Image: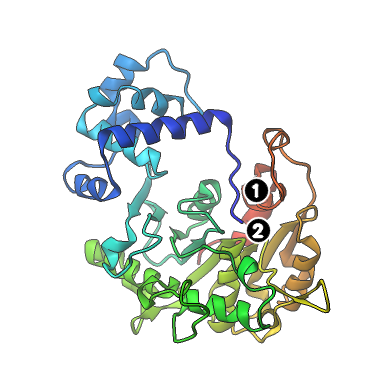
């Protein structure tokens, strides 16, 4: 499952922003339309008068300034309202970075479910020849997700997409007591949609598959800004996988791993997955067969990390061995829970720390390397 490390201050901020969005009646579609007429700008530019008038005595940091602005929703200029709306979605403009949030159905009207937001990020100095990193969130997750990791990827020279997709229910919830091929077929259904059906209530439409979502997003970006050459990440109407690095958390990492088995990708980065399993001989758990199948992506391009105290650590160790990830490319995180997490009720509190805990930033940097 996807996990966020979130402070009480941030929770208050998100609640305030959500209330503002409801009161203002602002939707992502309206935001997209507004962006055509209101230039996106960092907070200091978009909200300078409001910051001076309403928030001059507010301490900076932890989203307090945005929370202050959201409390004066009815008194903000159009540019500042847009900024606050974007901040509520994790899509606020940033200095020296290009940030876009795009509704998937805007790229393909046939996308009907899990139609939340695709997040696009790159540093303005990054050339169009850079490789693309595509991040897939875990179960119940949605883009942007791990913004610190995505920013680190942008600083490592990548263009970055955090892609929305059909991430419920989890593979590991649906498949363990079904035939051994279930997990692989389930993932293929969600990724390619090429005829394999698991269950009519779960089946993706072709439009909602991960591959179609990515292709349509890249096509949309290229049509809006052809100078950025987004079409270079496409080849014959499919993703140009050699130019793409895949990364994911939990269920999203399993999707990334499955694609890296089927395609020759630039690199694959796995956080706490896959651990797909089949229950056999009573309660014995055996890794799903697809994990040990040959991969088109060579072992030296695989990287993975998990925490030694997360619930499925033993399965993850077996999985990473079956995937043939080189030992030097694996990190087993061992630190304690951050103080902010210790009081929380969580059945698997260490699941996700490898992606979110600042203590493991050097390990994530090794996973990322640098874009060619």
Query: Real-space Cα distance between discs 2 and 1?
Result: 9 Å
Q: Position of residue 109 (x, y in %)?
A: 26, 67
Q: Position of residue 307 (x, y in %)?
A: 75, 54
Asked whether 372 or 360 is in front, the reply is 360
Residue at image x 23%, y 66%? 223
Please identify the residue farthest to the top as the structure is shown.
57
Q: Which mark is residue 361?
A: 1
Asked whether 126 or 161 is in front, the reply is 161
Please identify the residue farthest to the left as the structure is shown.
37
Above or below, 177 against 90 in this view is below
Q: Position of residue 157 (x, y in %)?
A: 48, 58
Residue at image x 33%, y 61%? 104
Instruction: Tell me: 189 left or right of 216.
Output: right
Above or below, 41 against 30 in this view is above
Q: Secondary structure at mark 1?
A: helix
Q: Earlier in the sequence, mark 2 or mark 1?
A: 1
Above or below, 184 against 87 in this view is below
Dividing the picture into quadrants, the one containing residue 328 is bottom right
Q: Position of residue 272 (x, y in %)?
A: 68, 60
Circle 2 crowding by C-alpha within 10 Å: few under 14, some 14–19, many from 20 = few
Dividing the picture into quadrants, the one containing residue 339 is top right
Instruction: Tell me: 29 left or right of 286.
Output: left
Asked whether 117 or 226 is in front, the reply is 117
Q: Secondary structure at mark 2?
A: helix
Dividing the picture into quadrants, the one containing residue 53 is top left
- Which residue is the site of mark 2? 366
Residue at image x 38%, y 38%? 87
């Amino acid at each position: 499952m996807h996990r966020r490390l979130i402070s009480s201050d941030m929770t208050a901020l998100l609640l305030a922003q959500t209330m503002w969005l409801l009161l203002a009646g602002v939707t992502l579609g309206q935001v997209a339309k507004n962006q055509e007429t209101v230039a996106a700008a960092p907070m200091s530019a978009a909200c300078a008068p409001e910051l001076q008038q309403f928030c001059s005595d507010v301490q900076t940091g932890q989203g307090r300034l945005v929370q202050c602005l959201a409390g004066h929703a009815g008194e903000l200029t159009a540019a500042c309202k847009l900024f606050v709306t974007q901040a509520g979605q994790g899509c606020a403009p940033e200095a020296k970075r290009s940030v876009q949030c795009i509704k998937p159905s805007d790229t393909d009207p046939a996308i009907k479910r899990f139609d939340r937001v695709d997040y696009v990020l790159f540093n303005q100095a990054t050339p169009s020849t850079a490789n693309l990193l595509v991040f897939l969130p875990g179960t119940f997750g949605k883009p942007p997700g791990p913004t610190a990791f995505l920013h680190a990827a942008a600083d490592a020279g990548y263009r970055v997409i955090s892609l929305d997709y059909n991430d419920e229910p989890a593979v590991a919830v649906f498949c363990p007591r079904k035939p051994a091929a279930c997990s692989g077929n389930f993932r293929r259904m969600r990724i390619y949609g090429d005829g394999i059906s698991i269950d009519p209530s779960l089946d993706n439409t072709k439009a909602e598959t991960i591959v179609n979502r990515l292709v349509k997003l890249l096509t949309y970006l290229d049509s809006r800004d052809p100078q950025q050459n987004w079409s270079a990440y496409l080849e014959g109407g499919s993703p140009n996988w050699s130019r793409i690095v895949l990364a994911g958390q939990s269920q999203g990492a399993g999707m990334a791993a499955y694609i890296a088995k089927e395609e020759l990708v630039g690199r694959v980065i796995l956080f706490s997955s896959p651990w797909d399993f089949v229950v056999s001989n009573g309660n014995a758990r055996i890794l799903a067969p697809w994990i040990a199948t040959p991969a088109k992506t060579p072992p030296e391009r695989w990287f993975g990390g998990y925490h030694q105290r997360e619930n499925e650590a033993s399965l993850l160790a077996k999985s990473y061995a079956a995937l043939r990830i080189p030992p030097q490319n694996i990190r087993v995180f061992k630190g304690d829970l951050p103080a902010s997490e210790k009081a929380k009720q969580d059945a698997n509190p260490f699941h996700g720390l490898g992606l979110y805990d600042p203590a493991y930033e050097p390990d994530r940097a090794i996973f990322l390397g640098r874009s060619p």
